[in-house]
Image (cartoon, coloured by chain):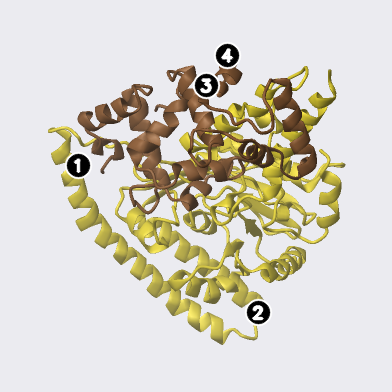
Chain colours: A brown, B yellow
């Protein structure tokens, strides 16, 4: 009659908590651990792409492939760290940083026109033509004072997205 | 609902395992308050709603919940209760279990020693043979139920044999079938299983008119559909039992009902089954456990407690589509058995959701972008 949560000691929980800047409570971490073990069906210590995609609600998400690249092969500690951006306790800066990372596929600290276009392609699919997508993005960039050639850094993202209307919160169920 | 038109055209062929999830999904999930005004850069770059949805699904999702085994609360973590529990283990494994194996063995001996002669000797007298075989199958199922000390309470009138009716029930484990079968010899539609269960299916259960299919084989569907239609027309056939969820769910939720059973033009008699988890979780998690292991688990527990309700027969209302009908029956069963309804297709256990789903989300976003582009 083993219980998965009993495998986490207080010490482990505190370590994970520290790793994610205390954005999750201890109870939430226990819940996340149960969930992690549930998703990690073969018990390999990380959740494979296939295991992530077995959650239909995730598989149908337009950004799922992009997110998979960020969460692939993470152990529990890193998994919690990625999710910490969605905690109500995370700062706006942390949330924007996460969004920035989703855009910045080559991790060079700059988001180019191509990268923005590619996220927009994921979001709109076949319902906007490639040509129109480019036009829209170029126009909106120019209106905001950038050009097609300029690449955006994190501080630009903070400036653009950094007001309180950013809603990016996920509640961890505790039972 | 724009897709109903498309749907009707395909409903003439009995579509057992390719449902349209879209028809069941609440459209509210992706509707945020419609943003207005001119499109700005932040509107394009702000992907937080989509990200939150994805993260929400990683943290918790209704689909996985349907197939999660919920073990009974451990109660033995206590110096006083632990010896009691140990004593229980000894009784269950060393007294109850052997006794139950014995009961089951006797059951099989009685069953086989009468079934085989009846099956071969009464070749010419089909009517009699059918009647006796039906009776014998009910007997062996009673032995099975006895082998896990099944405490089953049946509510409502017992089913009678009539043409043009199908019974539909929620599905938790293969033992649902055994529990229903011990009262009435139903003919069931079931996935073909490997191993000894498969052998039983193709020999004994075939004689009560059960129909087997293979989820993975597309051409099976048409054959099964035809068999179904033929079966419900025969006045002398055993009543048909269908588990329209198509897969075992953990008895806390109901997943989408496949519309096949509701397109036959028959009266649909809902059956609700609710297990009491006081001694054992009757959910068969087929990914983690073979059926043999599942049976052993049941046979080493104190008892399997469950309620079965035979509910009021329903017919297709004028103007109702088979899908609406299926949903109405699912409602009735869910309410009676106290189950939560989720909009997922149980077959997603075996396959990925169709890209249509994602496309719908993309279309929503694209539409809003294009619309706001026009606004000044």
Q: Is residue B69 left or right of residue B272?
A: left
The answer to whether dots 2 and 3 both sit on one chain is no
- Whole-number angstrom distance, CA of label 1 to CA of label 3: 61 Å
| Residue B14 visible to the viewer | yes
Q: Quadrant of residue A56?
A: top right
The residue labelled by disc 4 is: A163
Q: Chain of mark 4?
A: A
* SS at badge 3: helix
Q: Nearer the viewer, mark 2 or mark 3?
A: 3
Q: Quadrant of the N terminus of chain B?
A: top right
| Image quadrant where one finds the C terminus of chain B | top right
Query: Pointer 1 indicates a residue of which chain?
Result: B
Task: Give the residue drawn at x 41%, y 47%.
Answer: A47
Q: Nearer the viewer, mark 1 or mark 3?
A: 3
Q: Whole-percent x and y of residue B165?
A: 72, 55
* Residue on which disc 2 sits: B126
């Amino acid at each position: 009659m083993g219980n998965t949560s009993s495998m986490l000691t207080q010490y482990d929980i505190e370590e994970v908590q520290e790793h994610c800047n205390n954005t999750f409570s201890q109870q939430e971490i226990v819940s996340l651990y149960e969930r992690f073990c549930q998703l990690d069906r073969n018990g390999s210590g990380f959740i494979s792409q296939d295991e992530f995609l077995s959650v239909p609600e995730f598989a149908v998400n337009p950004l799922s492939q992009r997110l998979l690249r960020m969460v692939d092969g993470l152990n529990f500690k890193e998994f919690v760290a990625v999710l910490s951006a969605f905690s109500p306790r995370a700062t706006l800066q942390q949330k924007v940083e996460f969004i920035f990372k989703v855009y910045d596929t080559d991790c060079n600290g700059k988001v180019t026109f191509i990268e923005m276009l590619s996220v927009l392609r994921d979001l709109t699919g076949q319902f906007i033509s490639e040509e129109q997508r480019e036009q829209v993005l170029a126009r909106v960039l120019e209106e905001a004072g950038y050009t097609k050639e300029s690449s955006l850094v994190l501080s630009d993202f903070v400036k653009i997205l950094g007001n309180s209307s950013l809603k990016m919160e996920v509640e961890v169920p505790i039972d | 609902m724009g897709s109903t038109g498309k749907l009707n055209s395909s409903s003439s062929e009995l579509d057992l395992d390719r449902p349209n999830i879209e028809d069941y999904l609440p459209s509210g999930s992706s509707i945020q308050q419609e943003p207005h005004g001119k499109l700005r850069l932040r509107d394009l770059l702000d992907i937080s709603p989509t990200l939150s949805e994805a993260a929400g699904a990683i943290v918790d999702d209704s689909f996985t919940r349907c197939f999660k085994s919920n073990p009974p609360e451990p109660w033995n973590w206590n110096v006083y209760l632990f010896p009691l529990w140990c004593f229980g283990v000894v009784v269950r494994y060393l007294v109850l279990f052997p006794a139950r194996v014995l009961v089951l063995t006797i059951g099989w001996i009685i069953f086989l020693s009468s079934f085989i002669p009846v099956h071969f000797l009464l070749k010419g007298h089909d009517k009699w043979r059918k009647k006796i075989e039906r009776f014998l199958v009910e007997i062996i199922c009673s032995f099975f139920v006895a082998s896990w000390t099944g405490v089953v309470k049946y509510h409502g009138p017992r089913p009678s044999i009539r043409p043009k009716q199908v019974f539909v029930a929620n599905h938790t484990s293969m033992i649902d079938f055994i529990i229903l079968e011990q009262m009435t010899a139903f003919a069931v539609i079931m996935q073909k299983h490997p191993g000894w269960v498969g052998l039983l299916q193709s020999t004994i259960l075939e004689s009560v008119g059960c129909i087997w299919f293979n989820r993975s084989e597309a051409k099976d569907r048409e054959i099964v559909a035809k068999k179904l239609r033929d079966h419900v027309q025969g006045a002398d056939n055993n009543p048909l039992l269908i588990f329209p969820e198509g897969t075992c769910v953990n008895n806390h939720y109901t997943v989408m009902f496949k519309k096949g059973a509701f397109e036959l033009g028959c009266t649909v008699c809902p059956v609700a089954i609710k297990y009491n988890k006081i001694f054992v979780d009757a959910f068969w998690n087929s990914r983690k456990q073979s059926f043999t292991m599942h049976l052993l688990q049941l046979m080493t527990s104190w008892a399997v407690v469950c309620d079965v309700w035979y509910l009021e027969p329903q017919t297709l209302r004028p103007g109702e589509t088979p899908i609406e009908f299926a949903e109405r029956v699912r409602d009735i069963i869910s309410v009676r058995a106290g189950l939560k309804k989720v909009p997922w297709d149980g077959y997603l256990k075996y396959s990925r959701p169709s890209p249509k789903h994602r496309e719908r989300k993309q279309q929503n976003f694209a539409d809003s972008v294009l619309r706001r582009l026009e606004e000044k």
